[in-house]
Image (tube, rainbow, N blue to C red):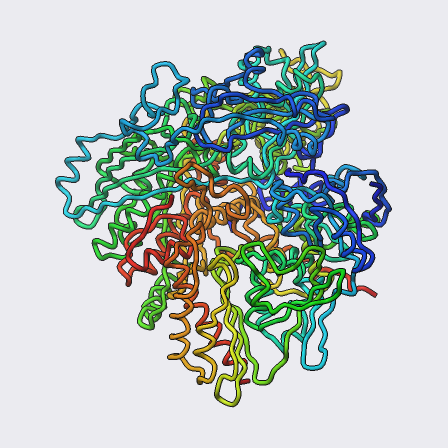
Amino acid sequence: MQTPAPFDYERATSLDGAIAALKAHEDARIVAGGHSLLPMMKLRLAQPSRLIDINDLTELEYIREEGDEVAIGALTRHVELLESELLAERFPLFRDAERVIADPTVRNRGTIGGSLCQADAAEDLSAVCAALKATVVMRGESGTRTVNMREFHLGPWMTAVGEGEIVTEIRLRVRPGHGSAHEKLERRAGDWAIAAASAALWLDGDTIADAGVALSAVGLTTIDLTRAEDLLRGARPGEELFAQVAAIAAEDCSPAADGRGDVAYKRHLAGVLTTRALRKATARALT
Amino acid sequence: MSALEDRPIGFGRLKRKEDARFIRGQGNYLDDIRLPGMLHAAILRSPFAHARINSIDTSAALALDGVAAVITAKDLETLGLAWMPTISYDTQAVLAGDKVRFQGQEVACVIATDEYIARDALQLIDVDYDPLPPVVNARKALDPDAPLIRDDKEGQVDNLASPLWEAGDEQAADRVFAEADTVVERDIIYPRCHPAPLETCGMIADFNPQTGQLNIYNGNQAPHAHRTVYAHVAGLAEHMIRIRCGDIGGGFGNKVPVYPGYVCAIAGSIVAGAPVKWIEDRSENLMSTGFARDYIMHAQMCSKDGRITGLRVDVIADHGAFDSTAQPTKFPAGFFHIVCGSYDLQAAHVQVKAVYTNKAPGGVAYRCSFRITEAVYLVERMVDALAHELGVDPVELRMRSFIHPEQFPYQTTTGWTYDSGDYQKTMRVAMDIAGYEDLRREQAEKRARGELMGVGVAFFTEGVGAGPRRHMDILGLAMNDGADLRLHPSGKAVVSLSAQTQGQGHETTFAQIVAEELGIPPEDVEVRHGDTDKSPYGLGTYGSRSTPVSGAAVAVVSRKVRDKARAIAATMLETRPEDLAWEKGRWYVKGDRTQGVTIFDITKRAYSGEVLPEGFEGGLDAQVIYDPPNLTYPYGAYIAVVDVDPETAHVTVRRFIAVDDCGVRINPMIVEGQIHGGLTEGIGIALMELISFDEEGNCLNGSFMDYLIPTALEVPDFELGETVTPCPHHPLGAKGVGESPNVGSPPAVVNAVIDALAPLGVQHLDMPLTPARVWAAMQGRPEPPQ
Amino acid sequence: MNISISINGETVTRDVEPRTLLVHFIRDTPGLTGTHWGCDTSNCGACTVLMDGRALKSCTALAAMCEGHEIATVESLERDGELDPLQQGFHECHALQCGFCTPGMLMAARGLLDVNPDPTEEEIRVAISGNLCRCTGYKNIVAAVRWAAEHQEVAP
């Protein structure tokens, strides 16, 4: 079978230790679930000099409510996100997404921090967090800083995480009138998305106070549909509005043709899935 | 359930004997074998589809700690192993010396102390390539300006892989078409796919320079044929080569051919003086080993007075860079000309043009008997197209056009003699299980609401169990199989086979055959196979030939033993053999059941010091080589029910009904298991399995991330039925079945999807039916696969 | 580096390279070859084992990452000569053919039954959706897991 090239390995016993190790070694990489990194290393497309294993930093594994926010530790596994009643209650799109991310065995291992840091445009949680306008918390030698999810991905496989920094937490603001949904179409269970749409709404009565819509797999990075969000904000949810949003989704994404479909199909799908996600989000907000 | 299942010993739903080790993780697969001092091989492969090799620098790799040898074509030339024969009388480079002809072709082989180091060394080999324009599209392979791929072959001036091949009667077909009242015409592609067994291919070679003995451990489907090939290639006597196949993690045709990696392992063992293990990774398996199908077909079908009367087919077969397609010698397009299917046609004509392209070689039968899958897919798609044109229900057109029971044995217009069948009956059983009329009603209601539901029917006839030696050989080896049966003094039996199980349950089924024939419990019958030193010669397991050929061999050898036992029994009972009658497990005196001896008594006698019949030498055993008089022709009626999401074009196979008639079922549980597996592969082929290439000849499906195999979530809870029409010439009345479900299910699924899309005017759509491709068809622009 | 992992309740120690994959550690060091591998990309699930009770694809974990954790392989299922109900169910329901995916299937199913002793057919299909099988078409595997659920002794 494919095997990785040689590297050094250390197991971090503290977050500060991991940060120091990252700083001390050129080409060192953090490994958590390893389900994106290790296959790349087996293909020898990634050849880090050192792996810093943060799996023992269980202090980064949590989902908890803190004031008007839900905080998720970066090391939280997909399976915890799937099973969390708190998340299902506060942000139901998480469960939608986690049901269709990879397969249950991979979900036992993969983490939210790893998913976001992979900065793969086809990855689902990036769209989920973008739609929710999450805040990503990072820590380095000089302390902690935060970046809005919308500014977290700088390009394909590139993030705002600086040298010697580690993502520690994802923070989500809890606001009233919320409903959200994630819709994904895949060629087969466990496959990456052909396209996926995350929609989050915050209703004030029968009006949309705020909205977040983001798409996976139809651009070089997660696509934030800001034009659609502007349209939604202040409007009343309904089929006509959703159709307008779907048209924007199809227009504002920039898919590439590949084995999953051609550009026209993916644009079409972006619209369909956005509509479905908005419909479901609205229904959830209203119940 | 058939009455046979109630029989106390022999045939029936016997739980498998082989399970005991597998459920404990005690199987013995290739990678589980460790020999003392064993080294590991890894193969460097071409990144280009077509390129000249200027130079290969292995010095840095050789300098790496732990590397024992780096082998290139130059080294193989000195051993006489640079080229090897394919199973279609072509030659294939073991390691590329002059140029590479497909992406993933073997270029160099590293032998090292472990597989990690071997792969480190691959990164240190420097190959200087001059890229050449590749031939990717088979339709353009014969263009005058197409680059010549096989410049290694003397006299080869174009990319034709084998001479134009024809079957049927062209003029007769023309006449039938002239008289027809309706004609339909379609371009139909059966795209390239891959058997992708869960265990990849590999070998451990252990050459002993002192004795000249070559020991091989390998999971292949035809160990005896492989040994003969190695004997030719290496110039060794066959008895100096021993191949042992342990447990095999699936084959499905992929483990029929001899691969360059095997020869590299052998060469590596010779060069390094140690056992060498080579096991390919998944990408190597998908990108370089035997693919399946890749038939570009153009067909016309005609009818007169509502019955199908004629068929004309033109095929371009893409064989890749080396012709290693699997087929009997006289059948360069395999059994494709069984394309008349289950219908009583007046005439048909088929021609097949095989071309070289810069793609991996193959053309193995992925769970199908030599191109029958392509043939069945074509004819079943065409029947649906014709039914659509005629405005009749697809079942109705099939019913009208079927061969009738009284016509068997039936001679097809392309030269096959079908053994037995009652097609209408099997079709009706399937319709009953499906509730066909109700489904059509449900469909009409849904269509009225804009929902896309489809019902697809396919009816197939397969020809399996190759084959009669006067017609069928591979590399000059008759397609026969041997069986040796020995009863020990205790009454326990050992039967040795040339068939090679890859999960088919031979250890159980063949024990049941001996048990049935000799009246001893199946648990007292040990089935041995997989060791060329300890099993009779034969051509192995593929083309659903185990039960039709080896199963017959085991039945015949058991009857030989029974006949010997009869003579001994006559001596014991002091009577003449002809005065004895057989009932399960004993010979008794006709007319007096109390006077009899059991097979156990007889066996004991055979080994004892007591008197034996004149001419008997003691012991109780027999051996046979079985030459089947004809293929067996299993058939079946399949119905798929699908739902297509009108917005996303995603296809869900909601129900799948499979009614197979494979003659007598020795172990119905195993038969049903085989059907479940084949249906899943067929649904996979219909919906997602594809090996495709970009314009540069880069393989786009080189891992399980892109070569998609169905999971438990894509397949429905299969609904099976059966009819039993015994094979008249098989000693047990059995036919083969392993491949039927893979053959019959793709057209059922595709017909169902096209049926679902009929309101949108869709008349044809090539596999795989991925959402994107279905959606394109819904937009009125169906596209052929790459 | 020296690595100690508890495999099937026994501590296994070996000096290995950091890059050693767990599947190789399991197969090479205690020689537990029941855990197979079938792909390189964590798609096929043939290498599935349990780590601390949860299914894990051992081709996509470094042995070094598993130090201090409890690994259970297919060889752990039979206890004192008593087969796990899943092993029995696979035999009873003809849920295996070539046997190559079977250890991974058994361990994925074990992981399911440990948290959900009475799963529906759909829950079973989801739980084994990361485990590919080319032979059985899954129908009998689903039946076997149900069989095991119905024949499990309730823990005291």
Q: Say if B412 sits above or below B769 in the image.
A: above
Q: Is residue C99 visible?
A: no
User: Would you place residue C91 above or below residue B350 in this image?
Assistant: below
Q: Position of residue B480 (x, y in %)?
A: 49, 23
> Which residue is at 69% across, 18% downward?
B272
Q: Name which quarter of the figure residue B224 lies in.
A: top right
At a point 27% along the width and 33% down the height, the residue shown is B350
Residue B488 quadrant: top right
Q: Is residue C120 left or right of residue B184?
A: right
Q: Residue furthest front?
A: A142
Nearest the viewer among B332 and B142 is B142
Seen from the viewer's position, the closer of residues A70 and B680 is: A70
Image point (58%, 30%), residue name: B500
- Front residue of B150/B121: it is B121
Q: Position of residue B637 (x, y in %)?
A: 39, 49
**Image location of residue B138, percent across then percent down:** 34, 34
Using the image, determine if residue B408 lies above or below residue B533: below
